[in-house]
Image: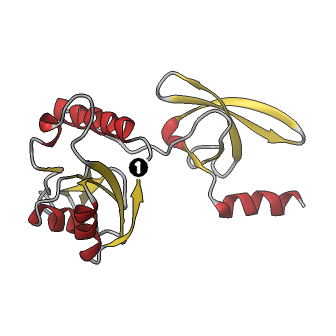
Amino acid sequence: MPILKREPDLFPSDLFERQDLSGPCGDWWVAYSRSRQEKGLARHLGEHGVPYYLPQAEKVVRRHGRRLQSFLPLFPGYVFLLGAVAERRVALYSHLVVRVLPVEDQFQLHQQLASLWALQQSGAPLVPHAYVRPGDEVEIVDGPFRGWVGRVVREKGLLRLVVSITFLRQSAAAEFDRDLVAPVRPVASYRRVAAAS
C-alpha cells in the first residue's frame, strides 16, 4: 500500500529521448531544495513547463503487519532541471529552493543522468550509497566493528571495500560490505580525536 502516490521522475516523460545524443538542449542546473520538498519542487516545475529529473527509489517497510511503500528521492535535497535563466527563475520563485548550483561539465552530467534513467527503465533496483573511494575516511555503521573509524584501502568488486583500521599505531585491514560503511561524520571525527588525546 503506497503512503503517497509516486510522483513522475521526469518531465516531460520523453525528456531523455528528445535530447540529442551529443548533449542536452539548454543547460542543466541542480536545485538544492528545502528539506523534504523535492517532490513539491518537481510538481511546481512540471506545472510551469520546466523540464526536470527527480530520480526516486522505492522503500518498503512493514508496520503492524502492513506493507507500506513509499518513493523517496535517490539524492535527497536535489532536483535536476533543464533550461535557461528563465527556467532557473521559475525554480527560485517556488520558494522551495535553497540555492541553484551551476553545472561545470554539462555533457558529463547529461550522460550520467541519461544512464541513470536507462537503469531505472530497466527495472534495476536503485539503492542510494554514500560516495566513498580509496583514501576516504569511513566509519563502520553496523556489525562488530560498529563505531570504528578507518580508511578505505581499495575497492574489491562492486559491493565490498577493504578498510584499514588503525589502532595502537598499527593497522589491520578487513573487508566490509559497502552498506556497512559511511563517510566519517564530523561528530565521529571529534570522538576519535578526543579519544586519542
Q: In x, y percent, where is residue 129?
A: 44, 43
What is the tally of numbered marks visible in this picture?
Answer: 1
Which of these two is toward me, 142 or 158?
Answer: 158
At horizontal 18% and vertical 50% (from top left) the residue drawn is 9
At horizontal 64% and vertical 32% (from top left) the residue drawn is 134
56 is higher (above) or lower (below) than 99: above
Q: In x, y percent, where is residue 131?
A: 51, 42
Q: In x, y percent, where is residue 140?
A: 61, 46
Q: Secondary structure at mark 1?
A: loop
Residue 32 placement: quadrant: bottom left
Residue 166 placement: quadrant: top right
Q: Mark 1 is on which residue type?
A: Val
- Horizontally, residue 176 falls left or right of residue 45, namely right
- Horizontally, residue 151 falls left or right of residue 112, namely right
| Mark 1 lies on residue | 103
Which of these two is toward me, 76 or 50?
Answer: 50
Which of these two is toward me, 63 or 45?
Answer: 45
How many neighbours does mark 1 have within 10 angstroms: few (below 14), some (14-19), or many (20 or more)? few
